[in-house]
Amino acid sequence: MTDTCQHQSREYPEGRISQEWLWALATLVITLLCVVIAYSDTFVETAAVWSQSSHFKIGRFVVPLTLILLWYNRQQFLSSPPRACGWGIPLAALAAAVWLLGEWTNISLLRQLALLGVLSSLVLSVLGPSLFLRALPYLAMLLFALPVWELFLPTLKSVAILLVKGYAFIVQLPLESEGYSLYVGGKRYIVIDYCAGLQFILLGLLTGWAFGLLIYRSLLRVFLLSLLGGVLALLANAFRIAGIITYDYLVGGSSQLDHAWFEMPALIPCFALLFFVFYKLQPENTHQEPAAIAGRKLAAQGPAGLLGVGMTVAVLIAAPLLTVYSRGHGAVAAGTMLLPMEMGGWQKTAGQPLWQPEVRAGLVAEDAATYRQGDRQILVYRVIPLTPESKVSGGAVRLFRPGFPYNHSEVRELCDEGICRGTYVRATYMAQRGRQLGQLYYAYQMNDRFTASVLVFRLWRGYSRLVGEAGQQVSLVAIASDRGHEITSAELAQLFSTAVGEGQ
């Protein structure tokens, strides 16, 4: 009897599931249930994005499609025996550490990425390294269910603008661009996040990846076919935007046609081309047994392997248990007024302010007000989290004012008479065809300091939770001014400090 998990020449008849595989599948299901329960909040958080965001509606189809492909290619796995091992323990420890970092810093992206490591560590422990390598393309497919792709939105919008400008140059369309704004004649088009075409690109990538798994075993070939699908979808999105602009230009800019009518005419030819390429490709023999890896101790069998699976599950479950004690503690009491009546000579005026940012996360307290100093006017907004888990950074609060194109942003350190005290804010400028419309300044408060960095703010909050420091003052403060009502650096420094110093 051997204590290693080397490939053996034994194969199983096609369509028959061995007893070893029945035990392995039962073990995998049980351990998956344990992990899903332990990380239920993160799984629910990820699934919620599929219905809340138009970019990731495709995410709900990824898991069923992956299971279908696994069943279709099941002989790739059933032809070799599974070998439980402890190789998943290091991967589980890494996944748990990433999840803990995401939990303590309240960064959803890290928690969701950690789920992929959690699932991978279970597969590695239950099935062994060789079968894990075969399952890797299917595990990678789960990336399409995670909202991590939102990081590429600014890049995709820039690429879409570049492609539309190339189209306008070819057809001699009088198009000008300024940041994320396009001008054709007297009409302005704002390239919003939806115009990035992320939902179409994800569909193209997922379709290409699924096609690749149907006919290839090579991960590189699967990746290249998926990349082709993504590129075709990117072009389809550019054609969609170009079609909208061209149609409006031809009808004199008076078209009221819904832009959704331009989606299918652009998408159908591109995806038809992807289907045609898939039809013409020569498939590999996906049921061919790979060459044996001889002479390497890959994993333990028997009790040692089951012990490795148990330790992997224990490491994974330990991470959520470590955070239970900190949940629900240190909640900030919601006040009736977060902003003072006077801030450095600026007087608060009565009435509802014209600017009210959109809060996309619950359990926060907010206050917005208009302040005047002589003939100048500014809008001030402050939002504080009511619990350690509440978010006020990233996409939790949408600050930008509707109808105002933002095309330039920079981080500034505020100084008063040459004295700088480490107050950093992000200054975002609103402009249209070279004419400045106004400014928006915002920063994250950390007790008596401000930062423009979301990462620094979240790391600071995470450290506070980790060491159990309750009662920390954290908030998001934003100040907006229109053209002609500019604010000096010294005034901004005083406004930010008084907004949190007297507003509690």
Image: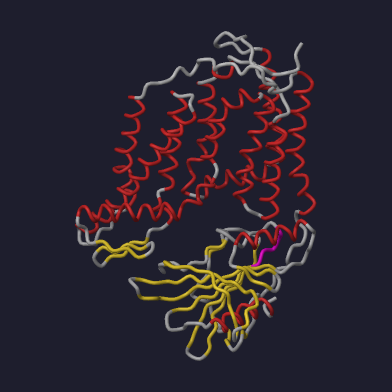
Residue drawn at the location 70% of the way across and 42% of the way down:
96
Residue drawn at the location 28% of the way across and 52% of the way down:
242
Q: Position of residue 377 (x, y in %)?
A: 50, 83
Q: Position of residue 166 (x, y in %)?
A: 28, 53
Is residue 113 inside the magenta stretch?
Answer: no
Establish if 383 lies above or below 396: below
Residue 36 sits in which quadrant?
top right
Between 421 and 459, the residue placed more toward the observer is 421
Count of numbered badges drawn on the protein: 0
Q: How is the image coloured?
A: secondary structure
Q: Position of residue 291 (x, y in %)?
A: 56, 16
Side (left or right) of 180 relative to 392: left
Question: Which quarter of the rendering shows the C terminus?
Answer: bottom right
* Magenta portion: prevailing SS class: loop
Establish if 254 lies above or below 236: below
Between 427 and 390, the residue placed more toward the observer is 427
Is residue 385 inside the magenta stretch?
Answer: yes
Q: Position of residue 165 (x, y in %)?
A: 29, 56
Residue 76 sits in which quadrant?
top right
Which segment is the magenta one? 384-388
Side (left or right) of 118 relative to 215: right
Residue located farthest toward the bottom when viewing the structure as drawn: 374
Residue drawn at the location 77% of the way across and 29% of the way down:
310
Between 43 and 13, the residue placed more toward the observer is 13
Residue drawn at the location 63% of the way across and 53% of the way down:
107
Side (left or right) of 455 relative to 100: left
Question: Which quarter of the rendering shows the N terminus?
Answer: top right
Establish if 418 lies above or below 114: below
